[in-house]
Image (cartoon, rainbow, N blue to C red):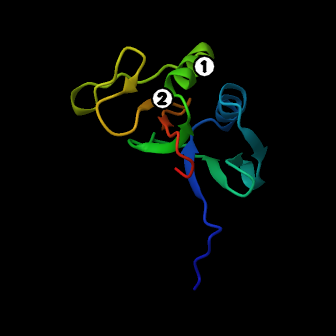
Amino acid sequence: MILTNKAFSGFSVNDIQKAKSFYQDKLGMEVTDGPMGVMELHINNDSKVLVYPKATHSPASYTVLNFPVDNIDQAVDELSSKGIRFIQYGGEIKTDDKGIFRGGGPLIAWFEDPAGNILSVIESPEKGM
């Protein structure tokens, strides 16, 4: 089959340098520069996410990247101390004062990268999520 287990995802940003600083300095991710002005986020030993500059970038209206964590309150506190602001939602996905959804299912909190793309931390004490 033509498809392989080496697939990767990607998303755009409007300022690759701001994105690089955010992902590297605030989130502590390994980031490398790729060809033609793109950057790669290293997720683990073998997986990467491609982040590419796009002059006509529009932020995704959905979560583009989820970060599983063992303790969501600890993760939210740590990221908040680095200046990351969590999105406050109402209605069906109402979040608490910290920005954490605790209404059934996994505990999750959403935030944005500098380009407005939505990211999340999601509590996943079980390995494999």
The residue closer to the viewer here, 6 or 17, is: 6
The residue under label 2 is 111
- Which residue is located at x 53 percent, y 28 percent? 71
Q: Is residue 56 visible?
A: no
Q: Is residue 27 left or right of residue 104?
A: right
- Give the alpha-carbon distance from disc 2 to disc 1, as whole Å: 13 Å
Where on the picture, by quarter, is residue 16? top right
- Per the rendering, the mark at residue 2 is none
Taking the spot 75% from the left edge, 53% from the top edge, the residue there is 45
Q: Position of residue 30 (x, y in %)?
A: 75, 40
**Camera-side mark, 2 or 1:** 1
Drawn side of residue 39 relative to residue 120, left or right: right
Q: Residues within 10 Å of mark 2 (few under 14, many from 20)?
A: many
What secondary structure is found at the residue carrying circle 1? helix
Residue shown at 61% from the left, 60% from the top: 8
**Amino acid on which the number 2 mark rests in the picture:** Phe
Give residue 78's mark.
Answer: 1
79 vs 60: above or below: above
Q: Between disc 2 and disc 1, whose residue precedes?
A: 1
Q: Nearer the viewer, residue 12 or 70?
A: 70
Q: Looking at the rendering, in which quadrant would you find the N terminus? A: bottom right
Could you say where residue 77 lies in the image, as x and y percent from the top left?
55, 17
Which image quadrant is residue 81 in? top right
Query: Does 35 sit left or right of 62 as displayed?
Result: right
In this orientation, which residue lies closer to the viewer: 128 or 89? 128
Residue drawn at (66%, 25%), measured in percent from left and top? 26
Marks 2,1: beta carbons within 8 A: no
Q: What is the three-letter code of the residue carrying label 1?
A: Glu
Q: Residues within 10 Å of mark 1 (few under 14, many from 20)?
A: some
